[in-house]
Amino acid sequence: MAFPQETWKTRSYRLRSNAAHVPLLMKYLIVNADDFGLTEGVNRAIREAHQTGLLTSATLMANMPAFADAVGLAHSLPALGVGLHFNITQGRPVADPALVRSLLNEQGEFLGTTTALAKRALTGQLVKREIGTELRAQIEKARAAGISLTHIDSHKHAHLLPPVFGMVAELASEYGIRAIRLTRERPRLTFNSPKQLKQASVALALARLSQFNAPKLDAVGLHSTDHFLGVAETGFWTQAWLLDKLAHLPAGSTELMCHPGYDDQALGGSQTRLRASRQVELQCLTDPAVIAAVRQHQVQLRHFGQLATPSRAVEGHL
């Protein structure tokens, strides 16, 4: 099932900060799954959400166990946009550990959290050159596997740390990667639990970092989406929430971040806090009522590689 394409009207477009040309009244949605390559169960859910649901894009983890499986799936899904989920918080580096020591603990692994990475940056222990070394190694690994990267985001949003973001923007431009995620989200003001309040606070902090970093994209000619959804509701998806967001999607381009997956034994050993919620997200993304809402509200599905050419719809994956 394919979503309809619209006529590209050159006389009614706008250029928002860091965004590609988007028609004034059109609504474009990129549904991006993080953690492609984390486990085979996550990969399988991404494939299903793309083939039978709304998913248009996924970001690849170059240093995770199911990387090769994800690459194989990516090659079998030509309509799926694939970016890099730059990872300097979990697992071991792709680069020679001796070249990225400031990113690692005594066991030769990444520090585990963005907070730990930020503390190291604030105390002057994080070497910017080493961030670039690891990013380059992850980009090169994906390219060597035949993946043409559409954009870059990161595990645990580490790329939004100012010392990291500058290097990500610089190397994205060098490698011809035209888009980077900015989490410019406005979370709702009512919450059902302290955990949701905490997650909304994280979303606000990341939105501030995104605002701070946005001019760096202008400087190197890169772009992001106009709007963003997903941080505040990570772990708390419901069908009602997603239907509401589709009904009130703003004009321009929006990224919806998601984490579909299967809660299997491999996921349990992957050091992720997201377990059962991944299957809830998969169900929402493939729900017939949600798919119908996309048509009803005339939302056009895209991936990041199509931000600059919005007349090209994602065809044939539903």
Image (tube, rainbow, N blue to C red):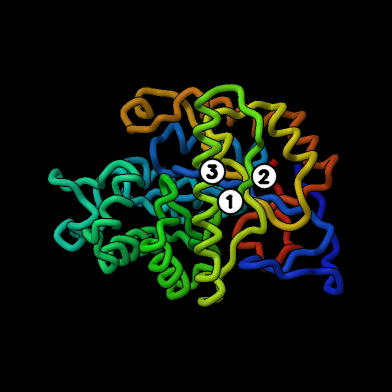
Query: Which residue is drawn at the image coordinates 53% and 57% (left, top)?
Result: 210
Q: Is 53 left, or right, of 122 in this rendering?
A: right
Q: Which numbered mark, 2 or 3, is in the foreground of this view?
A: 3
Q: Quadrant of residue 187?
A: top right
Inter-mark Cα distance, 2 to 1: 8 Å
- Residue 189 on image: x %, y %: 65, 35
Q: Secondary structure at mark 2?
A: loop
Inter-mark Cα distance, 3 to 1: 26 Å
Query: Which residue is drawn at the image coordinates 67% and 44% (left, top)?
Result: 317
First in residue order: circle 2 vs circle 3: 3
Query: Are the residues tagged 2 and 3 within 8 Å (C-beta)?
Result: no
Query: Which residue is drawn at the image coordinates 55% and 45% (left, top)?
Result: 204
- Residue 22 on image: x %, y %: 75, 64
Residue type beneath disc 2: His
- Residue 246 on image: x %, y %: 75, 40
- In the rendered image of this protein, does residue 25 appear above or below residue 21? above
Question: Crowding at label 2, few (<14), some or many (≥20) Cα neighbours within 10 Å?
Answer: many
Residue closer to the observer: 141 or 213: 213
Q: Is 44 left, or right, of 256 in this rendering?
A: left
Residue type beneath disc 3: Ala
Residue closer to the observer: 225 or 307: 225
Q: Which mark is residue 25?
A: none
Query: Are the residues tagged 2 and 1 within 8 Å (C-beta)?
Result: yes
- Residue topped by disc 2: 317
Q: Secondary structure at mark 3?
A: helix
Q: Is 209 left, or right, of 311 in this rendering?
A: left
Q: Is residue 180 visible?
A: yes
First in residue order: circle 2 vs circle 1: 1
- Residue topped by disc 1: 80
Q: Is 145 left, or right, of 233 in this rendering?
A: left
- Residue topped by disc 3: 203
